[in-house]
Image (cartoon, helix red, strand yellow):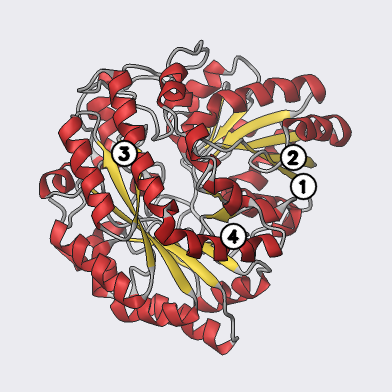
Amino acid sequence: MRLLLVHPSALMYSEIFLRLEPLGLERVAAAAREAGHQVRVVDLQVLSRKLLEQELRSFQPEALGISLNYLANIPEAIEIAHSAKAAAPGCFVFFGGHSISFIGDHVLEQADGAVDAIARGEGETVVVPLLEAVRDGAAHTVPGVVTAEGRGPAPKMLDSIDRPRPARDLMRRRNRYFIGELDPCASIEFTRGCPWDCSFCSAWTFYGRSYRRAAPEAAAEEMASIREPNVFIVDDVAFIKPDHGHGIAAELERRNIRKRYYLETRADVLLRNEEVFERWTKLGLKYMFLGMEALDADGLDQFRKRISPDENFKALEKARRMGISVAINLIVDPGWDEEQFRLVREFALAVPEIVHLTVMTPYPGTEVWHTEARQLTTRDYRLFDIQHAVVPTRLPLEHFYRELVSTQAVINRKHLGLSTAIGALRVLGRNLAHGQTNFARMLWRFGRVYNADRQLADHARPVRYELPVPERRGAPGRKELFVHTIGRSGTRTQETGQQQTEQQTGPAQ
């Protein structure tokens, strides 16, 4: 079967700071290709909508799959689905991905016949059975699949994340993927799932609190196949298990693989597994994203981070001593006033680290969705991008955005000031010498992208597609939120996130 896979356009945050290789879509493409299907991929982060239209006409796909890891891309995806039906009559259109897994039935109804199926859960397990079932008109019987005719059994999980290996050769313009100054940058996955249960996050609900690890040998073999000099490790929390981090490091050392790495982790993991991170600095670990989320204990408790401010600040000190550049994330509460924005600006100017701000957003699949969603001031999918306020703000909305942009601008100027200009120019020169312009464009686009007038105007756009609202208020039972459940038929029992958390922090409260 001719299968065309599509990744939607970049979101607001991605316009400046990063544009990541669509690793999940590459793995789905690999699974389909290994089963004998003819596969092409169009990533609209780096390719034009015009090229997609040309592919629809020339390739005439029999099936079209769109990856939806972000709610904000849903209206665009529905429009593409309608275009595909017009350009390739008879094409079977399906959506898959993280965010769509929680609201599949609703989106299917909104698409008004342009979408034939929603694939919930891990795409690698569903794509081949789905394509086989399409021929027999039995898509609704496939595990994880939702159609107008009905829904199949619960989605299955991969027994091992070692395979399929991403079909990187299908990607065009790979030089457009970057994160910060790591330009170009590939991505790789060492683990899947998260054992914590932060109230604002849906990673743990998507995977049913499971946690799986790639074999060190398989991870190193994949790393050896990556041509880019820079690699982003996409794990939700890197190096939770020290033996795993050491195991992969040993395999990379044995193969003499040296790259520059960027990863995400938690402060308590860094403090507990300091030797692992030290070892990885020798392999090329240069950058780290640390989700501090809040500066005080009350904020951390609100988000159920299960960590103290003291641990966060100790981790920053450890990273500095290791020579790792840290990007800190703080969640902006819509209830902030001018004083709280001022305190964040003071903190951001007092530390050497980059500070990113994201607006607290209730997403389907999270606990805060069920406790906050009925307060939504908008249900426009496009505003659910962690850069817009979608619940009531304490300040007038325009004032809130001006405080937000002012704080972000102060942080931005700190990293583009005279003291950092020489270092930035050095990096810029190196990248330009290799024909890489992503980092250069990032440096001077801030004012155009982060603009209070633009953000406010986004709320006035006509809305055609809207999010559903939970039927009842209040946090549901934990397992009601899960997309995957450990031990279901067709899945392998894993070490669960609950077991992991109890080993590390004591039983969940």
Residue 185 drawn at (x, y percent): 59, 60
CA separation in Å, label 4 and label 2? 36 Å
Residue that label 4 marks: 428
Name the front one of labels 3 and 2.
3
Mark 4 touching mark 2, by CB under 8 A? no
Whole-angstrom CA distance, mark 3 to mark 2, is: 42 Å
Tell me how far mark 1 sits from mark 2, CA to CA: 6 Å
Give the residue number, with chain letter if any, for mark 2. 4
Foreground disc of the pair 4, 2: 4
User: Label 2's element?
Assistant: strand
First-in-chain label (1 vs 2)? 2
Q: Which label's residue is closer to the chain start, 4 or 1?
A: 1
Which residue is denoted by mark 3 in the rendering? 407
Residue type at numbered disc 1: Val
Using the image, determine if residue 11 lies above or below residue 393. Answer: below
Give SS at disc 1: strand
Look at the picture and state if 112 lies above or below 51.
above
Which amino acid does the dot numbered 3 rest on?
Thr
- Give x and y (percent) for residue 70: 49, 36
Q: What label does residue 39 carry, if any?
A: 1
Q: Nearer the viewer, residue 492 or 301?
A: 301
Mark 1 and mark 2 residues within 8 Å of each other at the beta carbon: yes
